[in-house]
Image (cartoon, helix red, strand yellow):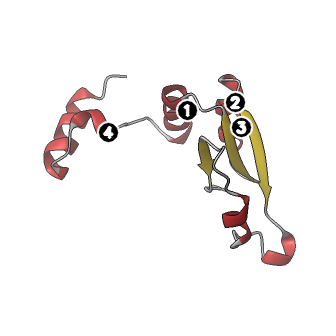
Amino acid sequence: MDYQQLHEALAEHHHIPASWIVAGNGETESIFTVVNGLQPRQAMIVVPGFAEYRRALSAVDCAIREFALREEDGWQLTEALLAALTPDLDWPVPLYAQ
């Protein structure tokens, strides 16, 4: 799908270049588009989480590190995530749509 008109309208509204905008038809398309564009080599995903992050990263042969949510934390992100983020990560993914 061509989103050129949408890119141009959003760029004009937000006063930014259209090349900065990525539009997609839902989460899955957007995740795969961004991953294919960035081609990360090392990434972190939150588990449990949206499986499309792993699928998209695996499709570009990216090494995947997991950050596991814990039941005792109510399955919520905690400050422990900050310690897990290291400079070798091309793409930390601290999002976890459930």
Indicate the position of residue 97 as horizontal and vertical percent values: 63, 55
The CA span between labels 4 and 2 is 24 Å
Task: Tell me if mark 4 has few (under 14), some (14-19) or many (20+) residues whose alpha carbon lies within 10 angstroms of its own.
Answer: some
The CA span between labels 1 and 4 is 15 Å
**Residues at badges 4 and 2 in contact (C-beta under 8 Å)?**
no
Q: Residue at x 66, y 65 (%)?
A: 82
Query: Which numbered disc, 4 or 3, marks the residue that appears first in the sequence?
Result: 4
Quarter occupied by the C terminus:
bottom right
* Residue under numbered circle 4: 21
Q: Residue at x 62, y 50 (%)?
A: 93
Of tags 3 and 2, the one toward the viewer is 2
Kind of residue indicated by mark 1: Val
Mark identifier at residue 54: 3
- Disc 2 is placed on an element classified as loop
Residue 96 location, quadrant: bottom right
Mark identifier at residue 62: 2
- Disc 1 is placed on an element classified as helix
Please tell me which residue lies in front, 79 or 87: 87
**Residues at badges 2 and 1 in contact (C-beta under 8 Å)?**
yes
